[in-house]
Image (cartoon, rainbow, N blue to C red):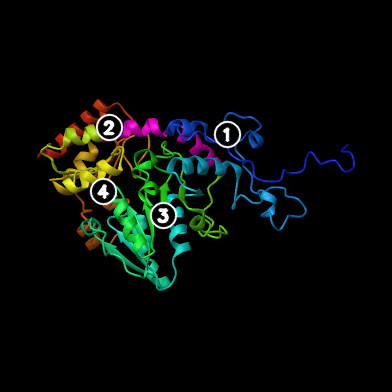
Amino acid sequence: MTEPGAPDPLAPKRGRPKFEPIPATAGPTTRLVHGAHRPELNAGAVVPPIYQVSTFHYPAAFSESSERGGQYLYSRNENPTVEVPAELLRRLEGAETCRMFASGMGAMSAAILSLVGPHDEVVAAGGLYGGTSGLLGDLPRLGVSVRSLTDDEAQAPERRLTESSRIVVLESPTNPLLRVHDVRRWAEEARRVDAILLVDNTFATPINQNPIALGADLVVHSATKYLGGHSDLTAGAVLGPRRLIDRIDAGRYLGATLDPFAAFLLERSLKTLALRVARHNENGARVADAIAEHPAVARVHYPGWASPEEEEIAARQMRGRGGVLSLSLKGGATAVDRFLRHLTFVQVAASLGGVESLASVPRQTSHVHLDAAVAAAAGVDDRLVRLALGIEDTEDLIRDVHDALDAAAASSPL
């Protein structure tokens, strides 16, 4: 029995347990493996546990000046397990803070809807993921105007924005044509009109590129892809300064909350992110080189390959080019069908970023909802195939893709 006046040992502790610091000189994998230590909360567990709960006990009275005394209250708003990948990503991207969501589109939607209002303008700076384009296309009914730039127009950011421009949405490399845009130049243009630069860094990952260091205000990730890396979870993240992150779905009323178990899986996956991305980079570059001159291929789309100018940008702002490339096949839809049917190790499925290699037709998957004329103008047509190369042995992937291209080039029916 507790002595009168003595603290109750079962009472929640005041203040949120803090993550242990990591030396600034630590490399990315060291930060990802050791960046989630909170002995006070995790009872010394080497792996942070799963807090699979919806609600938490809290004191009878909160201090008005202590934000509920730093206590957890309800898992839609905050959960100790969800804080773990948020902290790892924050450190990796060099952001002040990070907010996790149930999917990449949950993160993107919350960020844009929370930061724009009637009479504001959102600028789509070049090719974007189809889901993002669909979201932007729905904004005019809320009184928000949207202006879309082509990839070529986005290569020259200067004087592209107006005083009404509130958010610039930029994806580099783009999906699915892997165009590379100059984040630093766009950051300067956004600052000129006091706009927010939001960069979708899903394809590059924080291993290959850090947009905040290049001047971006916000970074969005579909953590379903490379960050999760095993095709077994959906998650999203928005990172940036607290002054902006605190405004993004502050009450969590949109409800796109990351589940604790998915957060646990994501923390597990992040430990190997740098190792996996190194193999993705190698496989992407070598397969692209190996098939560039194949007679069935009209064009290979890969970061930096569109022009000497984009190669210079990629070499300057990226540490690796990633594992995604797209192919335009000379034989159109028929050749695409033959190609997909003859793949062995590369599975035909939507998404990307997993340890397994995937092939998809963007016009039928990620960009299926785009208007046909818009898609055609953007180069997303029925002869385009996107390859998201995994971590298989490189020679196996080269042989697999090459043999499938041979089949696509053949004139005889299947």
Q: Quadrant of the C terminus?
A: top left
Which residue matches tag 1? Answer: 37
> What kind of residue is marked 3?
Asp
> What kind of residue is marked 2?
Asn
Which residue matches tag 4? Answer: 180
> What kind of residue is marked 4?
Val
Q: Which mark is residue 283?
A: 2
Which residue matches tag 3? Answer: 217
Can residue 230 be seen in this snapshot? yes
Q: Which mark is residue 194?
A: none
Crowding at label 3, few (<14), some or many (≥20) Cα neighbours within 10 Å?
A: many
Q: Secondary structure at mark 1?
A: loop
Q: Secondary structure at mark 3?
A: loop
Q: Quadrant of the N terminus?
A: top right
Real-space CA distance between mark 1 and mark 4, rounded to the nearest whole angstrom: 36 Å
Residue drawn at (13%, 40%), measured in percent from left and top? 296
